[in-house]
Image: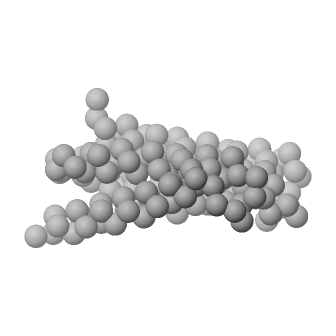
């Protein structure tokens, strides 16, 4: 099993499921553009979860597939798995949150893991330049 491709596939599927969820919530709430008047309501949660995923998932998929193609060091596999778990936890935390203005543990872990994993993979990519 190729962990890099598996994690890439999970993230791609996640992004499209989150996008579909926005469409379904737009239809249900009858809001075609923008959000409704509920900052922590289902439509706003869906939009924010999908938007956040769309910001990070494409670059992670590119990084994962690049490291797969060059046969990267073993610790990178762990980082890839950790980032994938964090990217799944983040929207889960948003959907479980009753108020998006308050901290939620899955969302917090997902965000912190995304930042740490992104910087670590960026440094690993930089090290490949030498």
| Left or right: 113 as drawn, with respect to 17 | left
Q: Position of residue 36 (x, y in %)?
A: 85, 61
Colour mapping used in the image: one colour
Q: Residue 3, relative to residue 22: is it above or below? A: above
Instruction: From the viewer's side, name the closer residue of 21 and 85.
Output: 85
Tell me what residue is drawn at x 18 percent, y 50 percent: 72
Residue 43 appearing in the image: no
Is 105 positioned to the left or the right of 114 in the image?
right
Instruction: Locate residue 74 relative to residue 14 in the image: left or right.
Output: left
Q: Residue 32 lies in what quarter of the image?
A: bottom right
Q: Residue furthest top?
A: 1
**Residue 103 appears in which quarter of the rendering?**
bottom right
Residue 117 locus on image (x, y percent): 36, 58
**Tally of numbered discs:** 0
**Residue beneath the point at 33% across and 48% down:** 80
The C terminus, quarter of image: bottom left
Quarter of the rendering occupied by the N terminus:
top left
Q: Closest to the observer: 21 or 100?
A: 100
Q: Is residue 41 above or below residue 10?
A: below
Left or right: residue 116 versus residue 107 is: left
Residue 106 lies, in percent from the top left, at 56, 50
| Residue 93, percent from left and from top | 62, 50
Q: Is residue 94 visible?
A: yes
Q: Residue at x 75, y 58 (%)?
A: 99
Identify the residue at horizontal 22%, vertical 49% (top origin): 75
Judge by depth and name the residue closer to the eye, 62 or 45.
45
**Image quadrant where residue 104 sits:** bottom right
């Amino acid at each position: 099993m190729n962990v890099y491709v598996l994690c890439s596939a999970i993230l791609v599927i996640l992004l499209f499921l989150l996008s579909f969820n926005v469409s379904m919530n737009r239809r249900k709430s009858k809001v075609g553009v923008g959000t409704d008047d509920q900052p922590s309501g289902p439509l706003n949660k869906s939009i924010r979860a999908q938007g956040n995923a769309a910001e990070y998932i494409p670059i992670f998929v590119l990084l994962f597939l690049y490291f797969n193609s060059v046969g990267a060091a073993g610790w990178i596999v762990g980082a890839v798995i950790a980032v994938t778990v964090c990217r799944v936890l983040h929207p889960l935390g948003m959907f479980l949150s009753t108020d998006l203005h308050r901290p939620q543990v899955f969302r917090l872990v997902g965000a912190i893991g995304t930042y740490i994993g992104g910087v670590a993979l960026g440094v690993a990519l930089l090290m490949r330049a030498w």
